Image: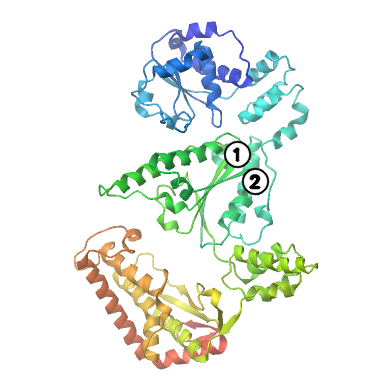
Amino acid sequence: MLIADKIARFKRVTKDPGVFLASCGLLRAAKTLGPLRLGFRGFLVFVVPPGYNTSDYETAAFEIMEVKRDEWAEVWANKEMRVRLANPPRIKGIPHKPISIHDLRGLDVLIAKNLADVPRDVRFAATAVLQVQPPTSGHINAARRLWRKPTFSQEFASSLSQRPQNLILAATLKPISAETRIQELDEIDRVEAVGPSLFDLPGFPEVTPWAKDLAANIERWRKRKLDWKLARAGVLVSGPPGTGKTLFASALANALGMRFVSATVGGWQAAGALDDMLAAMRKTFDSVNDGRGAVLFVDEFDAIGTRIARPTGNNNDQYWQLVVNDFLSLVSNLDEGVIFVAATNFPDWIDPAILRAGRIDDHFRFSLPDAVTRAEILRHHTGGSLPLESLMGIAGELPGKSGAELERLVRKALTIARNQDRDLELKDLEAQLPERIQYTAEQQLRLAVHEVGHAVASLALQHSNSSVIEIRRDFSLEEDKIATAQTVYDLTSDYLPTETSLLNRIAISLAGMAAEQAVFGDRSLGSGGTTGSDLEFSTASARKFIGAYGFGSTPMFIASARDVGDLPLPQALEDEAMQILRDQYEGALSMMTEERDRILALASEVMAHGTIRIERNGEAKAA
């Protein structure tokens, strides 16, 4: 191809200002070749500006190359395309064909959205890889003149050239000057909020300061006072179901004046086999890579999978390798203006490479709201019609309720009021409170003994400096997932755990069950039955002790601590782990038997006050 000849012959003005501006960018980039542009054989790679539409540049290249539209189909059929997109859009029913080293026959120009779309061997084979710059002020005014419209001032045209492609085209196409309406131009990409702003919602104290800093940076970026690399953000939010992860993302979009685009990893996987799943994932990312800005929210993020360090040869290994690799490429090449928010209930299941800085920089753990926050959430959903003070009592009767559950409770109360043609009253909310059942004195004592066992063992083994024990005197049948007793530790520093300190942790987790056996002669269900229970923790810890940390009779590594705790080890190692559990339980039971009288005395204090603090020196007082 002879670049000089092509430039000389490029006389015809396109009918599309977007294509005209793209043509200017391609020719400007080609001029950087210097003497090379006078004539060469080979092909050029053009990387378009971030957020720009590659189809405009593809059309512009065809016009520069003087390839007629009716020739395109014939060229495609012969697979000798002179102008190609490095990663063309996926079309259902047609095999996806990104550029490869085997598809360069007849190629003159390759258009890429970003450099990552061009394989390294293709880059090496290219005569040159050229970065296309956005239109200059001169290009913008040339387009205005060609379409017989008044030109912009140099200052306005220069400012406009730094804005996203859609705003440049909007101003270029306007019949009259857009300079007097620059404020309106700034608002074009700002989306009208549908729903609450994050800054108006209660229940997100841990993330609000971060979001306010982000909002300020987004405003600076919109005014081109801050580079996107300094404004961009990727964040992971985790927590139990109902803690408001989806609400946070949509409310963040409203606060930033951006579109909210939502997807789930499960939805991608439901598309079908691997190629279909990858196509669905790419389609989601393509929908936000248009330079207009968006909050991209991906739920069930742990389901994206993880790559194993040592492949087993199983087909699943390759599946997850490809999925994670493709995802990493997509999230690393998001266009300007895209905020990435991922949500999960299980953050430990996510591939560490995904969470590294530059992809996801921040991680916020959402917890169920405390009593004050519950009251604030109730007030928000009642529209502020009831004072916060009057809602505190109701909030206190709803331990463990999520923001979503509280909203549902208010909706039911509002329905009652509307059906009676009156305003909401406090009694409508009180009518939604779950029926509470009182624990018997013996049951309260058992709860207290169990928690005192944990606290006494923790203090005796120097795992903590003090412990706060709390029990509830009643419960609701709706609260089977909510702890009715708990011990909170002021932990001693242990930045480099030893065999002894790790074994002590297992003993402490078993001490509640041991205390029940020492005092009552039998044990309740309180130590097991669920993930996160005392027994689940101690069993997983024993397996990690042997299979990950190498503290068995033969030091060895089976898998990382994250992977080794959930499933049984090879039988010989599993036997060792089970022996650790037996030994630590026997030790905890011996300690609890010796401390039986003290445990009963402390448990009586817990029953009397509901909450007590125990110091390492043995002092106990109401908390």
Of the pair 277 and 527, the residue shown nearer to us:
277
Q: Callout 1, which amino acid?
A: Gly
Look at mark 1 in the image and give the residue it sits on: 293
Q: Callout 2, which amino acid?
A: Leu
| Quadrant holding the C terminus | bottom right
User: In the figure, residue 56 lies in which quadrant?
Assistant: top right
Which residue is pictured at 61% across the width and 50% down the height? 250
Q: How many marks?
A: 2
Residue 256: mark in rendering:
2
Q: Is residue 470 visible?
A: yes
Seen in the picture, residue 481 relative to 7 is either above or below; the reply is: below
Disc 1 is placed on an element classified as: loop
Which residue is pictured at 47% across the width and 16% down the height? 72
User: In the figure, residue 504 lies in which quadrant?
Assistant: bottom left
Seen in the picture, residue 428 relative to 98 is either above or below; the reply is: below
Picture coordinates of residue 413 (x, y %)?
A: 70, 68
Q: Is residue 328 visible?
A: no
Of the pair 360 and 172, the residue shown nearer to us:
172
Picture coordinates of residue 65 (x, y %)?
A: 49, 12
Alpha-carbon span between mark 2 and mark 1: 10 Å
Which residue is pictured at 51% across the width and 61% down the height? 239
Disc 2 is placed on an element classified as: helix
158 on left or right of 355: right
